Image (spheres, rainbow, N blue to C red):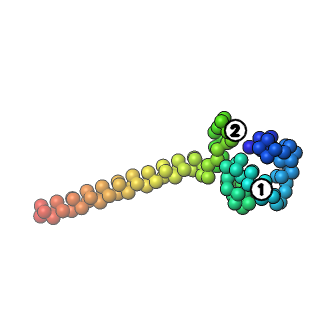
Amino acid sequence: VKQESLAIELNITQAGVSKLEDKEVIEEETLKKVAEFLKLPVDAIKNFNDEGALNFIANTANSYDSSTSHQFYFNFNPIDKIVELYNEKEKLHKEKQDLYERMLKEKDELLAKFLK
């Protein structure tokens, strides 16, 4: 989100937004407005740390909603999710293959016993 967009929403200058970013503590009312504008819970902003910030940035989707001039953010990395789903599918395929092999082996053993 650009400082200018947030400044307009908060009815302050861009320099005012820059000063907010440098503050350790922000007044509760201002924090609520910022959270509402960013479509985040206030606690998410209060508990933001370096690791969370990096994860947040890494998981940002670059889609744009022109009706609200906001960017959308995922709380997961879409590529990681695709890899996870692929790995799950591969695991299920392997389990299915193992089951078929066991069933064939049992069938062969039963057939061998029957033919004796």
Residue displayed at 83% across by 47% down: 17
What crowding class fits label 2: few (fewer than 14 Cα within 10 Å), some (14-19), or many (20 or more)? few
Residue displayed at 13% across by 63% down: 114
Quarter-wise, where is residue 99 in the image?
bottom left
What crowding class fits label 1: few (fewer than 14 Cα within 10 Å), some (14-19), or many (20 or more)? few
Q: What percent of the width, then of the height, locates residue 33?
A: 74, 51
- Total residue callouts: 2
Q: Kindly identify which residue carries mark 2.
A: 69
Q: What percent of the width, then of the height, locates residue 45?
A: 72, 57
Q: Amino acid at mark 2?
A: Ser
Q: Earlier in the sequence, mark 1 or mark 2?
A: 1
Q: Is residue 106 above or below residue 17?
A: below
- Could you give the CA–CA distance between mark 1 and mark 2, rounded to whole angstroms? 22 Å
Q: Kindly identify which residue carries mark 1.
A: 29
Q: Amino acid at mark 1?
A: Glu
Residue displayed at 84% across by 57% down: 23
Q: Nearer the viewer, residue 83 or 42?
A: 42
